[in-house]
Amino acid sequence: MLVSRRNFLLGAAFVTTAAATGAVFVARPYLAKKLSPELDTAYPLGILNDGEMRTIAALGEVLAAPAFEPPKGFFEDYVNLVTQTKRGLLKEYRSAAELLNATATKLFGQGIRKTFAELSVSARDQILHKLLWQYSARDRVVPKVEKIAASRDALALRMYVMEPLIEYYYRSQYGWAVVGYKSFPGRPQLDPRAYTRLPYDTEAV
Amino acid sequence: MKSAKRKDIPDVCIVGAGLVGGLMAYELARRGLKVVVLEAGPRHDPKDRAAYMQDIVSGRIAGPAWTSNMPERDVYSDAGEVEYPLNWLRAKAVGGSTLHWGGQIWRFLESDFRLRSLYGIADDWPIGYDDLEPYYGKAERALGVAGTVDNPFMARRSTDYPMPGFPFSLADKPFLEGCQKLGIKVHTIPWARNSVPYQNRPACAAFSTCGRFRICPIVAQYTAESHVGLAEATGNATVIANANVVRLLTNRQKRVTSAVYMNGEKKESEQKARMFVLAAHTVETARLLLLSESNQFPRGLANGSGMVGKNFMERPAVAVSGILKENVFPHRIGFPTAASLQFCDPKNRHEIGGIKMAFHTLSDPMPYTLARASGKWGMALAEEVHKSFGHQIVAEAAIEQLPDPKNTVTLDPKLRDSFGNAAPRITYSFGPYEKSTLEASAKLCRKILGATGAEEAEDGEDHGFAGHPMGTCRMGNDPDTSVVDRNLQAHEVPNLTIVGGSVFVTGGSLQPSLTMAALAIRAAEHIAGGKA
């Protein structure tokens, strides 16, 4: 019995779809774990060691706007607070430091161990690009691609370390300076009626 | 010995140290009455507020501690079609909900008291605007209201605002221009927030944290802690914090004799008094009455009419946001400065309820929200945040909800709080009136946004709440259909007064706080026998 070309193609499409569905079904627990890395809440609270903290502070320098760098100790204060108060975060910060240092060695070490913190900001930026993608808030495709393509540790780096550090920075005076504000929620206006006029520092960036 | 003990019994026990509890305490104590205030929550020191604000602004803590700080104590259940976020909207502490309120403070319209007479719907209040007008003035002076008389929709007023109002913000400009095109009158907003130093509190310094973060570090915005402090300063008032009143006991003469309360360690105590005032939030007031059932009051205290807990109301709200091409430089003051009451008393109010329009230019996204939503970092992120910030505006409508006996606060048959008492069960739904009004509101918001030139970002399909629970112990002349009389005295219990939003007959579309305050001052005058 001969199989028509049409039936052959239909059959092939069916088999391919079934195989893909099966693969997704089998890989579902793994995918779920990878796409949304969960915190290990059994991990103890505590603080990073000096080397780990240097790595995270160096990461903070890459995340901040170059024109509005916060003073030394800015990110450290925040990290010390959250790793001592929210279970699982200490482990993620440690993994992040390890991942960044390992990637630093791989990309820039030339056989010798390199730490993320000893590299230039530009080199550190390259490391982040190696691990993750940059995308705008409106982008609907790249975040999904990143979720599939990036490693679990890289996704956890974004989710549990980079995003909170970025938020912390943009809540501060340095983040408000990015949008041209010297006075912002939490800091009073020199003139309480300034809100009725254009701000005088709109050209700050 | 017996008479000495009787002498120690205070004149009045007030349950709740929020807006109306604090005001009542002061109004009674300054007239020489001995007052004890029982407050379920703790007492926060206003001196801690600045550091507290910094923690909230920086994200080091999630939000104010006064929002349901004891979840097991504050359990409740939802049984209606519409979920009611009770714990998000209330605060248990000295100061009550004024610790996190917006502070927008309007008089009701004359028509809000007469819906039955004017439109054939709901019921009239047993008092009218004219009865309350002098007390509105007293309440404005007590709380410290900054306002401008630029609103053609308000009823007559016999007194000036005690402080000058806050002018329009730069960010209001698109709304002012858009509404002008549509023939909609926009005016300023009265606020319980100092525009100049007033009553030992400083003027607003535009920290811009009162709206988004719900905290004023310098207490330029009124909180009921002011009147609690003033009451104590008379030497006639005592405030007991962390006192969760669980039952009111009565005697054979159907008078309340004492309030039973539990502290955090679940130790039971009893507070006697000659008179009692319930100022414990719309939901808790009804619940406490229902919990206080006895042989004389088998359906709950003061509930012979069966009206306790019925006609629960809110101010449902919709918001539509849009994106403008220009930056309106928001977040340089923490509260909106423009509104319109043009739709609060529509001609077809028998079909569509009042709609109060407010224009927000301090909504999200904040720089940190934009930054977190982006997948960029460093310079690329800074450029995106700078470009995106300041373009969003929001038209928000809060609407009138009619009283409906099916919307209730009852006792949950199974759920118990941490003291072992029945938790409140809220059965809440929208009727056709509210649904039509919400639909009309969203349409109006979209129309106004369109006139500003904004590109619509969110369509206003979802509703929210303004956080103003009302009803459950309505006032009225008829003891068969109401819980308290025109002076807020319980029909069935001669020494029990109920104050707060719970006594409202109808809700209107405007914020209820000033009406609550005016009614409380009036009730205090009545309790004190008309003594000024």
Image (tube, coloured by chain):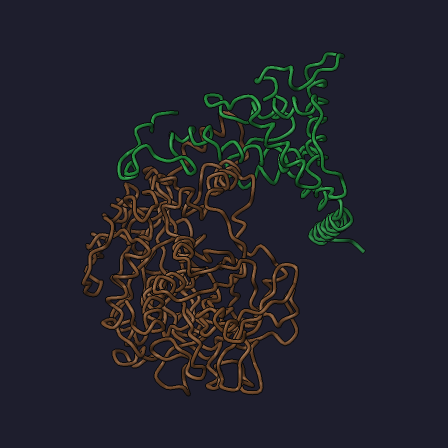
Left/right of residue B290 with respect to residue A118 in the rendered view: left
Residue A14: x percent and y percent? Answer: 72, 53
Task: Identify the residue shown where x is 60% and y is 67%.
Answer: B269
Extreme residue toward the front, this view: B1
Using the rendered view, name the quadrant where residue A88 is placed. top right
Task: Identify the residue shown where x is 54% and y is 84%.
Answer: B299
Q: Compared to B277, does A135 lie above or below?
A: above
Q: Chain letter for green, please.
A: A
Q: Compared to B26, does A40 lie above or below?
A: above
Report if residue B77 is visible in the image.
Answer: no
Left/right of residue B366 with respect to residue B148 in the rendered view: right
Residue A80: x percent and y percent? Answer: 64, 32
Residue B371: x percent and y percent? Answer: 50, 35
Give the position of the N terminus of chain B as an image quadrant.
bottom right
Residue B167: x percent and y percent? Answer: 25, 45
Q: Compared to B379, does B440 lie above or below?
A: below
Task: Identify the residue shown where x is 63% and y is 37%.
Answer: A82
Using the rendered view, name the quadrant where residue B468 is placed. bottom left
Report if residue B147 is visible in the image.
Answer: yes
Using the rendered view, name the quadrant where residue B105 is placed. bottom left
Nearer-the-camera pick, B477 or B253: B253
Task: Identify the residue shown where x is 58% and y is 87%.
Answer: B295
Nearer-the-camera pick, A48 or A64: A48
Q: How many marks?
A: 0
Q: Chain letter for brown, please.
A: B
Left/right of residue A60 with respect to residue B432 in the rendered view: right
Give the position of the C terminus of chain B as an image quadrant.
bottom left
Left/right of residue B420 with respect to residue B437 in the rendered view: right
